[in-house]
Amino acid sequence: MKKVITIEGMRCPHCSSNVEKALKAIEGVQSAVVDLAAKTATVEAAETVTDAALEAAVDDLGFEVKGIA
C-alpha cells in the first residue's frame, strides 16, 4: 500500500533524513521518501503497517503528523 504522510516541523535535510530512516525501520515498510519542500513522506508498505505505527515513528523524532492519506 502507498501512504502519504503530511509532516510539520521538518526544516532541513538532516530532519528529512531522520524521518526517512525512522519510517524505513518499521517492519513491513519497503520504502520511504521524504519531500522536505512539500512537507510529506511517501511510504510503500505492507498492509500490516498501521497508520499509528507510522505516526509514532514521526512523533518520536519530535515532528507532528498532520495527516495520512
Image (cartoon, rainbow, N blue to C red):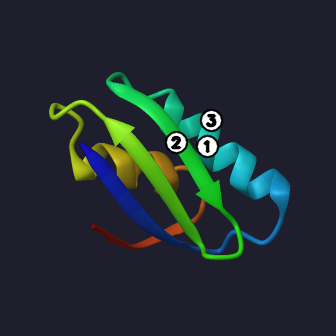
Where 28 falls versus 34 (above or below)? Answer: above
Q: Is residue 9 left or right of residue 55?
A: right
Q: Residue furthest left?
A: 47
Disc 1 to disc 3: CB gap under 8 Å:
yes
Disc 3 to disc 2: CB gap under 8 Å:
no
Disc 2 to disc 1: CB gap under 8 Å:
yes
x and y percentages locating residue 67 in the rendered image: 34, 73
- The residue located at (60%, 61%) in the rendering is 62
Q: Which mark is residue 55?
A: none
- The residue located at (27%, 67%) in the rendering is 69
Q: Which mark is residue 20?
A: 1
Please tell me which of labels 2 and 1 falls first in the chain. 1
Specify the amino acid type for callout 2.
Ala
Please tell me which of labels 3 and 2 falls first in the chain. 3
Q: Is residue 20 left or right of residue 58?
A: right
Q: Is residue 25 left or right of residue 39?
A: left
**Most foreground residue, 50 or 31:** 31
Q: CA distance from mark 2 to mark 1?
A: 6 Å
Does residue 61 appear in the picture of this structure?
no
Q: CA distance from mark 1 to mark 3?
A: 4 Å
Q: Give the structural element (helix, strand or loop) at label 1.
A: helix
- The residue located at (24%, 42%) in the rendering is 1
Specify the amino acid type for callout 3.
Lys
Where 56 falls versus 68 (above or below)? Answer: above
- The residue located at (83%, 57%) in the rendering is 13
Disc 3: which residue: 21
x and y percentages locating residue 5 in the rendered image: 41, 63
x and y percentages locating residue 16 in the rendered image: 71, 55
- Between label 3 and label 2, give the one nearer the viewer: 2
Quadrant of residue 22 in the image? top right
Disc 2: which residue: 32
Q: Give the structural element (helix, strand or loop) at label 2.
A: strand
